[in-house]
Amino acid sequence: MAALDTTQAPVFALDQVPLEPIAAAEGTPCYVYSAPVVARRLEALQQALAACHWPHAVHYALKANSSLAIARLIRDGGAGADANSIGEIELALRAGFQPGQIVFTGVGKSPQELERAVALDLKTINAESAGELDRLDALAQAQGRRVRVALRVNPDVDAQSHPHISTGLKSSKFGVPLADAAEMLRARRHAPGLEIIGLHVHVGSQITSLGPLCAAARKVADLAVALRSEGFALSHLDLGGGLGIVYEHGGDVPTYDAFAQALVDVARPTGLALIVEPGRTLVGPAGVLLARVIDVKPHAGGGRFVVLDAGMTELMRPALYGAFHRIEPVHASDRDVVPCDVVGPVCESSDTFGRVRELPEPQVGDLMAIMDAGAYGAVMSNSYNRRPLPPEVLVEADGRWRVIRRRQTLDDMLALEQA
């Protein structure tokens, strides 16, 4: 673990820890996360839920950021895990989560994944179809056990988010239609390998209004009440995650208090415990991607192309979704503010972080921080153009920092290849 260097005085720091020494030591591009920010946000969400005085559990969505150190930090904060693949399940186990703390979600679980998940005796498996329920029943019987399942319901609710991360419309691949769910469960009520214990819904990500969350929750809650009246021994209502964060100045998202109260108000009449699956909201604001300016050249429109050594291989969201991330110079400058198109070095025109951004006139060597990159950043990075995966650094509460993933090397990339 590296000690805090107090000789630097940049205008921008993470939890009062200067970023320039981290960039100097580990190179750029480089992800840096704040452990205190993650811990504070998780604690705030848990307190908001506890204040509603209703049985609940928080299961962190590992898909947002599944770095081992982040997963352990979340575990230490008292949350469970929500996994979307057997890889995430195995990661969760290595991070110290017990099988009974893991929920397994995912639209296409392979036979091998289902077999392993059944054997692990997870808290629950969120089934996505009638066929998956039947496969789970057969696997459980073959192993001489019963498997706890919840059915994922598609409520046909628009998340009012980007189409690529909206999952609750009837045209999406996720879950089963609300109208079919009751009959699907009735037909399997006495399946010897299944223990039907809940319902699950998740309508999307980066949701900035409680409206879609509550609309979906109410539909599934009504179904739960109906099923319980028929004698189904349900124990929980999993209302998913999706709560967004503020990426742009002036943006707004619901508070944790409002989020918790709204979902508990829906769950309470069902008599079922509440499960929520936050991801981005816990880790997104805790991370930055550090990058250096490697070229500046005139723009035909009168501005400048500012080329960073980070690109869509490190942070895919802008290229994939047109997502906005603030870009801040790490050091103060009295240079004139000029319009800049901030781009990456990858051989794709979509490799652009932001257009017409007003920045102090950048120069080669300047260190930039791409903000709110703790979610869906490093976890989606790739080695296109044979670019190595970036290192990840965690800033601790005592102001010290440590590398939690080293930079990938060419040897790492080629380790699985043969000439």
Image (spheres, rainbow, N blue to C red):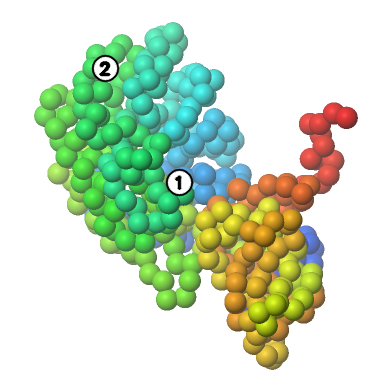
Left or right: where does residue 141 sit relative to residue 302? Answer: left
Splitting the image into 4 quarters, where does residue 181 fall? Answer: top left
Residue closest to the eye, 164 or 284: 164
Q: CA distance from mark 1 to mark 2?
A: 29 Å
Q: Point out residue 385 in the picture as x, y percentages from the top left corner.
A: 77, 49
Q: Residue at x 39, y 44 (%)?
A: 167
Q: In the rendered image of this protein, does residue 236 appear above or below residue 9?
A: above
Q: Is label 1 or label 2 in front?
A: 2
Q: Residues within 10 Å of mark 1 (few under 14, many from 20)?
A: many
Q: Earlier in the sequence, mark 1 or mark 2?
A: 1
Left or right: where does residue 34 sit relative to residue 213? Answer: right
Q: Point out residue 139 in the picture as x, y percentages from the top left corner.
A: 43, 13
Quadrant in the picture for the N terminus: bottom right
Query: Is label 2 in a helix, a strand or a loop?
Result: loop
Q: Are marks 1 and 2 in contact (CB under 8 Å)?
A: no
Q: Residue at x 11, y 29 (%)?
A: 229
Splitting the image into 4 quarters, where does residue 52 fall? Answer: bottom left
Q: Which mark is residue 60?
A: 1
Amino acid identity at mark 1: Tyr
Q: Residue at x 28, y 43 (%)?
A: 156
Residue 329 seen in the current view: yes
Q: In the rendered image of this protein, does residue 273 appear above or below residue 398?
A: above
Q: Point out residue 408 in the picture as x, y percentages from the top left corner.
A: 77, 47
Q: Point out residue 43 in the picture as x, y percentages from the top left corner.
A: 42, 57
Q: Residue at x 71, y 73 (%)?
A: 306
Residue closest to the eye, 348 or 212: 348
Q: Which mark is residue 188?
A: 2
